[in-house]
Image (tube, rainbow, N blue to C red):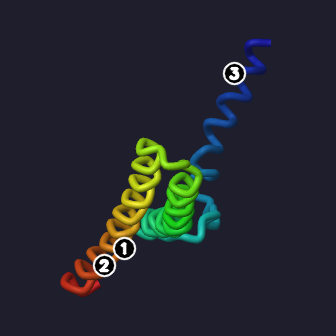
Amino acid sequence: MNKQILGIFLTALLLCPFAASAQIWLENPLKWDTIAELIESIANIIFWVALAIAPLMALIGAYNIMTSGGEPAKVKKGRDFIVYAAIGLGVLLMSKGIISGIRYILGG
């Protein structure tokens, strides 16, 4: 039994150089060719999701103000929602502008 296993192992070992010289072509399953393209795609997804969430947060803030019933704490909470949504939207748009500016300066 051990001689048979040893024989199979030695035969496989002798055939390895022939198998190693074979050309194997694997297609890229991703649509991106570089890491930079992959990161850019992920950043674009995050941008569009955040762009959709910011107005919703402003609407939640407006709803909190409308349903506050005059309570200063709820009015402040609603105002904070709106302010933070506006700040987030501004940062989001500036980040796209900064990236575009850097690409323009670097010639890419």
Q: Residue at x 46, y 53 (%)?
A: 78
Q: Residue at x 47, y 44 (%)?
A: 71
Residue occupying the far right of the picture: 1
Which residue is nearer to you in this view: 88 or 57? 57
Which residue is nearer to you in this view: 24 or 52? 52
- Residue at disc 1, secondary structure: helix
Looking at the image, tell me whether mark 1 or mark 3 is earlier in sequence order: 3
Q: Residue at x 19, y 84 (%)?
A: 105
Q: Is residue 89 above or below residue 79?
A: below
Left or right of 97 on screen, residue 34: right
Count of marks overlaid on the render: 3
* Viewport quadrant of the N terminus: top right
Q: Quadrant of residue 101?
A: bottom left
Q: Residues within 10 Å of mark 3 (few under 14, many from 20)?
A: few
Left or right of 96 on screen, residue 38: right
The residue beneath circle 2 is: 97
- Residue at disc 3, secondary structure: helix
Q: Name the front one of labels 2 and 3.
A: 2
Tell me if label 1 and label 2 are in contact, CB under 8 Å. yes
Tell me if label 1 and label 3 are in contact, CB under 8 Å. no
Q: Position of residue 59 (x, y in %)?
A: 55, 62
Q: Residues within 10 Å of mark 2 (few under 14, many from 20)?
A: few
The residue beneath circle 1 is: 93
Looking at the image, tell me whether mark 2 or mark 3 is earlier in sequence order: 3
Residue 25 makes an appearance in the image? no
The residue beneath circle 3 is: 6
Q: Gap between marks 1 and 3, in whole Å? A: 67 Å
